[in-house]
């Protein structure tokens, strides 16, 4: 269903604007997701600062606006908090014992004198060749990208078949604030940092992007498609929004 033009609604002397899938209040824009299964309203602040609301299908536009207005202080606080966290994300120093994430688990770093490759994962430890410390970040990104490529190629093949999606190519690269994207040409891309997240969260990222093959926007039909394959997508989405920032700083 195409999105309807935004309609102005008066709220506290200032007009709010709302359509089927978007709400604007106090200079903030929210993606609106309605569901027959939803019983309560929930606002999510993404790590990029994007905002979304999940609401029961029967909730009126005015109720939605009133709810957002009640939460404005909390919303602005969350936006500022995420911005501060991104600014303060600890930069890795590549020292002995430092922790590095991989599929949701933290592995301690061990510096080794001799090793054929810059970086390896052995016996529950990341092993970095001491002579490669100066290019530690590049070594980790390269390692993560290779593992992510293998993981996503296997998982995308399995899930694309179930979801009736034809994927021409799986790519892993730096996507900035995006975890993934699905192109109209059938190519699907993922941020290399996604492989740092827990498997169930990475799976959500993947199913989310595959669902875009059927619905390019975030309409109710899109979320219905996601829910068909991940009934608990809401908590995964919320977890990602609240905790995804922990992978910053490399």
Image: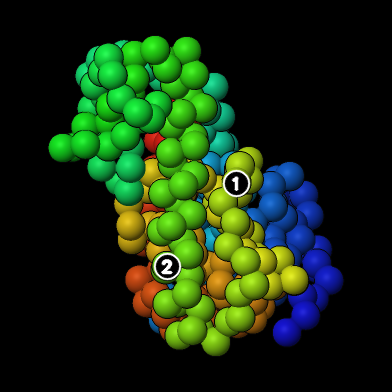
Which color scheme does this rendered protein use?
rainbow
Residue located at (16% from left, 37% from top): 123
Residue located at (46% from left, 47% from top): 146
Position of residue 179 relative to residue 218, above or below, is above
Residue located at (62% from left, 66% from top): 169
Q: Residue 179: where, in percent of width, then height?
A: 55, 51
> For mark 2, does the 10 Å Cα neighbourhood hold few (<14), some (14 to 19), or many (20 or more) residues?
few
Residue located at (48% from left, 24% from top): 137
Work out how far the residue at label 1 is from the one at label 2, CA to CA, in angstroms: 17 Å
Foreground residue, 115 or 19? 115
Q: Residue 149: where, in percent of width, then height?
A: 48, 54
Position of residue 46 relative to residue 169, above or below, is above
Q: Residue 111: where, in percent of width, then height?
A: 27, 17
Foreground residue, 163 or 230? 163
* Relative to 127, 5 lies left or right: right
Of the numbered discs in the image, which one, if any, rests on residue 98?
A: none
Q: Is residue 99 visible?
A: no
- The residue pinned by badge 2 equals 154
Q: Is residue 92 visible?
A: yes
SS class of the residue under badge 2?
helix
Which image quarter holds the N terminus? bottom right
Disc nearer the start of the sequence (1/2): 2
State if disc 2 and disc 1 touch (CB < 8 Å).
no
SS class of the residue under badge 1?
strand
* Relative to 145, 62 lies left or right: right
Q: Residue 11: where, in percent of width, then height?
A: 70, 55
Of the numbered discs in the image, which one, if any, rests on residue 173?
A: 1
* Relative to 12, 197 lies left or right: left
């Amino acid at each position: 269903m195409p999105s309807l033009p935004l309609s102005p609604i008066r709220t506290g002397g200032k007009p709010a604007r709302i359509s089927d899938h978007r709400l604007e209040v106090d200079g903030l824009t929210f993606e609106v997701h309605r569901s027959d299964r939803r019983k309560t309203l929930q606002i999510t602040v993404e790590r990029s600062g994007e905002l979304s609301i999940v609401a029961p299908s029967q909730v009126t536009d005015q109720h939605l606006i009133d709810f957002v207005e009640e939460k404005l202080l909390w919303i602005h606080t969350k936006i500022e908090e995420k911005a501060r966290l991104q600014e303060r994300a600890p930069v890795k120093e590549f020292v002995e014992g430092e922790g590095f994430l991989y599929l949701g688990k933290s592995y301690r770093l061990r510096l080794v004198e001799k090793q054929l490759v810059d970086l390896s994962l052995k016996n529950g430890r990341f092993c970095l060749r001491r002579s490669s410390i100066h290019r530690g970040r590049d070594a980790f990104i390269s390692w993560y990208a290779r593992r992510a490529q293998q993981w996503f190629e296997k998982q995308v093949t399995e899930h694309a078949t179930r979801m009736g999606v034809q994927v021409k190519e799986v790519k892993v690269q730096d996507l900035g604030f995006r975890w993934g994207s699905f192109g109209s040409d059938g190519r699907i891309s993922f941020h290399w940092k996604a492989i740092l997240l827990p498997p169930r969260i990475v799976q959500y990222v993947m199913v989310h992007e595959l669902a875009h093959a059927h619905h390019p926007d975030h309409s109710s039909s899109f979320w219905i498609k996601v829910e068909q394959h991940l009934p608990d997508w809401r908590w995964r989405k919320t977890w990602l929004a609240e905790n995804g920032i922990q992978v910053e700083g490399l």
